[in-house]
Image (cartoon, grey):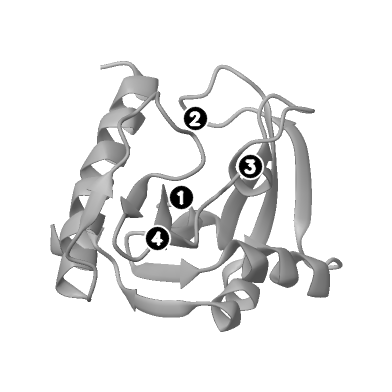
Amino acid sequence: MDKFYQDLDDGKNLEKLAVMFLAKNGYPNIETVPSGTFKSFDLYDAETGISWEIKKDVKSQATGNIIIEYEMPPGNPSALKRTGATYWLIDTGLKLYKITPYKIWMCIAENREKVIKKENMIGNGDTTPKCAYLIPIEIFEPYCKIGKSLLSVS
């Protein structure tokens, strides 16, 4: 299977796990936003108005950095610059990070000298270059609520 489609399937599976996790943790009305219809977030609770962006970053185990995309292609706002999500859930395969977009921006701003800004990078499975921040995990963690990876229990 093509890497892009494998990543897409992995993302859908993680969204299903996130729906089950959130239902058990006080959000029983979470729904998946149909792909291709809305790019601002992945999951939504119409009752509370809370929305979620779901990210998988297993590569962080090897790099020691959380990747936060902000443009794709360069000059076209995406992910962090375009999010409408109340919260982001980032699963590394070891831990699950819950964080608001505001706290991600705060982490980047307060740690500029340690956060790497990458431009024109092409990730595995991507065909289009993107711009992203690479945030060392030890810098990222204090801004998050941390739980057990959803991937490790699936």
Disc on res. 124? 2
Q: Which residue is mark 4?
A: 49
Between the C-alphas of marks 4 and 3, the distance is 18 Å
Compare marks 4 and 1 and give the one earlier in the sequence.
Answer: 4
Q: Which residue is mark 1?
A: 59
Q: Secondary structure at mark 1?
A: loop
User: Which marked residue is nearer to the observer: mark 1 or mark 3?
Assistant: 3
Residue located 43% across and 69% down the image: 97
Between the C-alphas of marks 2 and 3, the distance is 22 Å
10 Å neighbourhood of mark 3: few (<14), some, or many (≥20)?
some
10 Å neighbourhood of mark 4: few (<14), some, or many (≥20)?
few
Q: Position of residue 60 (x, y in %)?
A: 49, 56
Q: Secondary structure at mark 3?
A: loop
Compared across the picture, whether 47 is left or right of 82 comes to left
Q: Are marks 2 and 3 in contact (CB under 8 Å)?
A: no
Q: Which residue is mark 3?
A: 82
Q: How many marks?
A: 4
Q: Are marks 4 and 1 in contact (CB under 8 Å)?
A: no
Please, which residue is most extreme toward the front here? 47
Compare marks 2 and 4 and give the one earlier in the sequence.
Answer: 4
Q: Are marks 2 and 1 in contact (CB under 8 Å)?
A: yes
Compare marks 2 and 3 and give the one earlier in the sequence.
Answer: 3
Compare marks 4 and 3 and give the one earlier in the sequence.
Answer: 4
Q: Quadrant of the C terminus?
A: bottom left
Q: Are marks 4 and 3 in contact (CB under 8 Å)?
A: no
